Amino acid sequence: MVYSEYWNPKNEKLPREELQALQLLKLRRMCEWAYVTTPFHKRKFDAAGFKPDQLKTLDDIRRIPFMTREEWMESEMKKPMFGDLLATDPDQRYPLPPHLWHFWKNPHPCVGWYQRLGLDS
């Protein structure tokens, strides 16, 4: 294995303008995905009058309404266990098997969800 000071040389060595264009593209895609897949973010974006296509420069990141911990907890209280933040179709969610639960100084298992991607077919 060859050592490199870069984890991803292709992207990490990009000229500044190309790097910023890539960052903007990824930010816009992430916002579009959150808007389309999570009811929480759709509500939050709509309430703030924000649409992902408004991201024209990296400075537009200021337009994105960020989630607070209080909003996150309120969402979980209204709709346990994960609030309305899960970004998968409810019919495609499966509980993690117990052998994948992680315990860390906590008597309660950290239960999560995963989306089957055809791995068991």
Image (tube, rainbow, N blue to C red):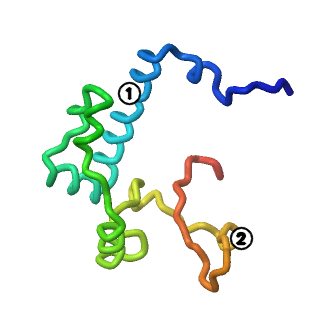
* Residue occupying image coordinates x 67% and y 30%: 7
What's under tag 1, amino acid-wise?
Answer: Leu
Instruction: Tell me the CA gap for discs 1 and 2.
Output: 37 Å
Q: Is residue 59 above or below residue 113?
A: above
Q: Nearer the viewer, residue 92 or 106?
A: 106
In the image, residue 104 above or below residue 40: below
Q: Residues within 10 Å of mark 1 (few under 14, many from 20)?
A: some
Amino acid carrying label 2: it is: His
Please tell me which residue lies in front, 86 or 27.
27
Q: Nearer the viewer, mark 1 or mark 2?
A: 1
SS at mark 2 in the image: helix
Q: Nearer the viewer, residue 82 or 120?
A: 82
Locate residue 65, reporting x and y percent: 25, 50
Instruction: Please tell me which residue is depicted at 22% across the width and 42% down the height of the picture.
Output: 63
Which quadrant of the structure image shows residue 87? Answer: bottom left
Identify the residue at horizontal 26%, vertical 32% (top origin): 55
Q: Position of residue 42 (x, y in %)?
A: 24, 52
Mark identifier at residue 115: none
- Per the rendering, the mark at residue 25 is 1
Name the foreground residue: 118 vs 88: 88
Question: What residue is disc 2 on?
Answer: 99
The mark nearer the N terminus, 1 or 2, is: 1
**Residue at 76% in and 25% down:** 4
Specify the quadrant that holds the N terminus: top right
The percent position of residue 86, horizontal first and vertical second, equals 40, 59
Which element carries disc 1, helix, strand or loop? Answer: helix
How many numbered marks have been drawn onto this rendered protein structure? 2
